Image (spheres, rainbow, N blue to C red):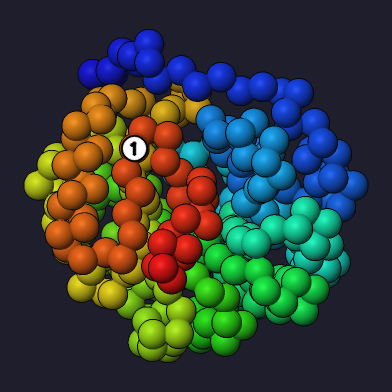
Amino acid sequence: MLVAQKPAWLNKKINLRDCNKMQQLLRGLKLHTVCEEAACPNISECFKKQTAAFMILGRNCTRNCGFCNIGHGEPSPVDNAEAKHVAEAVFHLGLRHVVITSVTRDDLKDGGARQFAETVLAVRKSCGNVIIEVLIPDLNADRASIGIVVDSAPDIINHNLETVSRLYPEVRPRADYRRSLNVLKIVKELSGSNIYTKSGIMAGLGEREGEVLDLFLDLRRVGCDFLSIGQYLAPSKSHYPVKEYINAELFGYYKQKAEEARFRFVASAAYVRSSYMAEEYISKERL
């Protein structure tokens, strides 16, 4: 199996001291972040600025994607105080834009949709002017479950495709490319123009340029507004290997082609992540 050599310039340092204050707050409220669980390379930068992507519904995912560092196994019981704790953290941090995500919970009838909705409503009640973005799992593309999230009226609903259709059996064996597209389609059908939709992909998993451009068109056909494109970095040697390190020129090319496909905002660079600098997407849209 071909594994790419990591270039020297792709070596962002994590300063653990910059994480301490945020981690103390999170532990005090019994909260988790995707920043920590997914081993995000931007963690110290974001935690130093006191921003984070909150991860609800526990730390164990019921799926096991080859690229993902989040734990999998027996999921924890739903915490009825979690929504209140997220709202407390958002208020304490004075956030203007909050991202709320979760593990996949196939064990729950609604996939965790009600917990998302309760968290959105709690944050809205506590911090009325905050922009709320939810990054949801596919919820098995169940219209009723997606409707629960839509009815809570977040500003952005994000669902990541992660990679091109051909690679799903290898990279996301329990997910489905068309099902994920359908999630975004249903959000638009239920919300009209009242909620922005967003998706993200990782580059360097073995995708071909033409497949990436086709993915852009697939996302635009279901009305996706915002797009993030970043370099895949394997969390460990046991995870799906990096097949290619993408240079700045190709990231720029993808940004250009996505903008030509008429996404409202595109972030495309090596360290771009779905929740990284998330406030930029909607602030640019509102200019």
Q: Is residue 99 left or right of residue 244?
A: right
Q: Is residue 45 left or right of residue 265?
A: right
Q: Position of residue 93 (x, y in %)?
A: 77, 53
Instruction: Name the residue furthest left.
Output: 210
Look at label 1 and name its amino acid: Ala
Give residue 273's quadrant in the image: top left
Q: Position of residue 249 (x, y in %)?
A: 19, 32
Give residue 268's quadrant in the image: top left
Which residue corresponds to the image point at 72% horizontal and 77% vertical from the top-left?
128
Is 269 in front, or is 85? 269
Location of residue 41 with respect to 259 vertically, above or below: above
Q: Position of residue 22 (x, y in %)?
A: 78, 40
- The answer to whether one can see residue 172 in this image is yes
Give residue 87's quadrant in the image: bottom right
CA neighbours of label 1 inside 10 A, class few (<14), some (14 to 19), many (20+): many
Location of residue 177 with respect to 130 vertically, above or below: above
Is 169 in front, or is 206? 206
* Pointer 1 residue: 269
If the image is split into quadrants, where does the C terminus sit? Answer: bottom left
Which residue corresponds to the image point at 53% horizontal and 30% vertical from the top-left?
41
Location of residue 14 with respect to 40 vertically, above or below: above
Which residue corresponds to the image point at 21% horizontal and 55% vertical from the top-left?
258
Q: Position of residue 165 (x, y in %)?
A: 23, 53
